[in-house]
Image: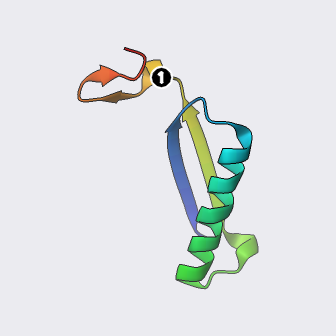
Amino acid sequence: MPLVQISLAAGRPPDQIRRLIAEVHDAVVRATGTDPARVRVLVQELPPTHWAAGGVTLAE
């Protein structure tokens, strides 16, 4: 059973998250031939204070 985990900075609207989940799900089904009911997509939203790039948090 494929499990895709996605980490994002918090703040996206729910409809955008739903669209992301649907498109990732469909891509996994196409690429692997897995039964769609067995594909799992987990989206974890992190606060900007807990996400950094280049040593600087997104909150800074």
Question: Along the line of sight, which residue is nearer the eye, 44 or 56?
Answer: 56
Using residue 49 as the reference point, say whether residue 15 is left or right of it: right
**Residue 12 found in image quarter:** top right
The one of 41 and 22 positioned closer to us in this rendering: 22
- How many numbered discs sit on the rendered protein? 1
In the visual, does 20 lie left or right of 57? right
Query: Where's residue 22, x and y in %?
Result: 68, 61
Determine which quarter of the picture holds residue 24.
bottom right
Q: Residue at x 60, y 85 (%)?
A: 33
Query: Residue 19's spot in the image, x, y percent?
Result: 68, 55
Indicate whether 38 appears above or below 40: below
For label 1, the SS is helix
Q: Residue at x 62, y 50 (%)?
A: 42
Residue occupied by mark 1:
48
Amino acid type at mark 1: Pro
State the quadrant of the C terminus.
top left
Residue 50 vs residue 40: left or right? left
Dividing the picture into quadrants, the one containing residue 35 is bottom right
29 relative to 12, above or below:
below
* Residue drawn at (53%, 80%) of the image: 31
Residue under the point 58% across and 61% down: 3
40 and 16: which one is in front? 16
- The relative height of residue 53 versus residue 18 in the rendered view (above or below) is above
What crowding class fits label 1: few (fewer than 14 Cα within 10 Å), some (14-19), or many (20 or more)?
some
Quarter of the figure with the N terminus: bottom right
Residue located farthest toward the left when viewing the structure as drawn:
54
